[in-house]
Image: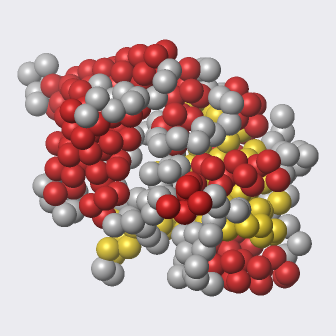
Amino acid sequence: MKLSMPVYIIISPVRNEENYIEKTLLSVTSQTVLPKKWLIVDDGSTDRTAEIAEDYSVRYDFIELIRRPQSPDEIAVKDRIARAAPPRTFNYGLEHLKNEHFDFVVKLDGDLSFGSDYFERLFKEFEGNPRLGIASGLSSFPRGSDLWTPFVPDEHVLGCTKVYRRECFMDIGGVVEVLGWDTIDEIKAQMHSWETRHFKDIKLIHWRLMGSANGFARGKMRHGFTNYYLGYHPVYMLARVARRMFDRPYIISGALLAVGYLRGYLGHAEQFPDDRFRAYLRETQVHQLKRLAHKITLSRYSPTER
């Protein structure tokens, strides 16, 4: 398939993004390859998010704003990430666009900004690799007057900006409405022999720290609990916690991640109900640990010593 003029649709689940959404609107509307459709799904915003998006929908015929109704049970849970609101809102938008033809579907948050060739460059990567199923750029976060770019494994695709090849999206059964959906889709894709990765030279700015909408500490502990829910290997989790100890705020970031994981482990909480998925995930993590150990061993010796 020639991807010089790919047909793609964007679905953006948004809530209370009035401080950032215009950055995303300006970024998308300036793309060298415009989407066929951009559906902005408002998930109960109480600020001017919907108003700003609606103004752009009047000016650009490929932008549409819809509002997702919320049940009383959803409203009662304040932590919308914990109740998997983003994938639920994404799927609500996808159902709305079920008759649209597309080569790619994009899940895009409303607090990002990126260059005008962002999607064009990603589609060139897809064109060059027929087995690339899910991809993204790499985001940095504002930190004072600078930008901070966290470490991200090569095969991880950012949840804030996921581009899915249609065939891969169908193979994995779409996006599941549970915590950790943005890891589940990657592992499922890999289980179907698709490649997943981000590209470091295709950059974005993520204006709000991931998972921080309900507070930094809650977000970190939720992340740790999600790792338990998905079935992370304990040794891999220990290495992950150790790595996050060096993120700001130092020590605290890793400690909160560990607390969330232990909360699930000690409480015998439910895990993602797919034994094959969890076994594959752990096997993948063991291979990653072995590769890391090999790199560390090699780095300790000079070529002559080896």
Q: Position of residue 262 (x, y in %)?
A: 21, 38
Q: Is residue 94 visible?
A: yes
Residue in the picture at 43% in, 21% down: 278
- Report the quarter where the C terminus lies: top left
Q: Is residue 8 visible?
A: no
Q: Nearer the viewer, residue 107 or 246?
A: 107
Residue in the picture at 56% in, 20% down: 191
Relative vertical location of residue 121 with respect to residue 104 in this rendering, above or below: below
Residue in the picture at 69% in, 83% down: 52
Q: Position of residue 272 (x, y in %)?
A: 46, 29
- Report the quarter where the N terminus lies: top right
Query: Total label count?
Result: 0
Would you say 140 lies left or right of 96 here? left
Which corner quadrant of the image does residue 58 belong to? bottom right
Residue in the picture at 60% in, 74% down: 45
Q: Position of residue 43 (x, y in %)?
A: 63, 65
Relative vertical location of residue 15 with respect to residue 22 in this rendering, above or below: above
Colouring used for the render: secondary structure
Relative vertical location of residue 278 with respect to residue 69 in this rendering, above or below: above
Q: Nearer the viewer, residue 174 or 305?
A: 174
Q: Position of residue 225 (x, y in %)?
A: 33, 42
Q: Nearer the viewer, residue 104 or 226?
A: 226
Residue lying at the far front of the rendered structure: 72
Would you say 251 lies left or right of 68 here? left
Would you say 3 lies left or right of 120 here? right
